[in-house]
Image (cartoon, helix red, strand yellow):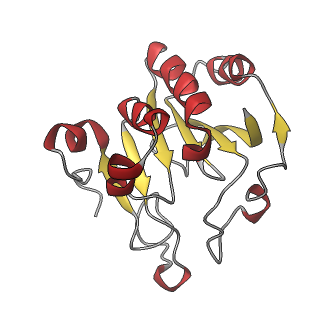
Amino acid sequence: MRIYGLVQDSIVDGPGFRFVCFVQGCPHHCPGCHNPDSHDPTGGREMDVEEVAAQMLSNPLTDGLTLSGGEPMEQAAACLRLAERAHGAGLNVWCYTGYTLEHLLQEGTTDQRALLEQVDVLVDGPFLLAERTLSLPWRGSRNQRLLDVPASLAAGQPVELAGQN
């Protein structure tokens, strides 16, 4: 997988101590993006999923995996394998995407839909500079939603994470 960066013990990319995998490559190019260097799909460095998983699992204090970017859905197959490893170790999985859940369900690839099956919370929608906020937890702009993915998949429609609005 192509990686922009890896962070241990993040407390800003979801609850608890998180291992954050920032993937390289993003088609959205949101103005004001906090990781514009992650947009170029040829940037970053190649890493084997197992190497990333080993780093993730090396810290016994880690509560969960956060997939961010760049755009994780552009590397859905690799992110799926990493998410499966996280769940296998009892970690929760969060994913940030510039796509909406509706788009991924209606127009997403088989790998993207499979990745959704391994995500506990999806922060969806593009970052909109005009909607930027520091007041909502774990989001950069007001249009972004915190979605309970298992509940959303069961309901066939977006279900927002309780108590986070």
Report the number of discs: 0
At 18% from the left and 45% from the top, the residue drawn is 156
At 24% from the left and 53% from the top, the residue drawn is 158
Residue 58 picture quarter:
top right
Outermost left residue: 155
At 56% from the left and 41% from the top, the residue drawn is 67
Q: Nearer the viewer, residue 100 or 109?
A: 109
Residue 49 picture quarter:
top right
At 53% from the left and 70% from the top, the residue drawn is 127
Residue 108 rendering spot, x and y as whole percentages: 43, 46
Outermost bottom residue: 130
From this view, report whether residue 108 is shown above or below residue 111. below
Residue 139 rendering spot, x and y as whole percentages: 46, 62
Residue 57 rendering spot, x and y as whole percentages: 62, 18
Left or right of residue 73: residue 6: right
From this view, report whether residue 51 is shown above or below residue 127. above
Left or right of residue 16: residue 143: left
Left or right of residue 107: residue 71: right
From this view, report whether residue 120 is shown above or below residue 158. above
Quadrant for the N terminus in the image = top right
Q: Nearer the viewer, residue 17 or 155?
A: 155
Left or right of residue 142: residue 4: right
Quadrant for the C terminus in the image = bottom left
Q: Nearer the viewer, residue 7 or 110?
A: 110
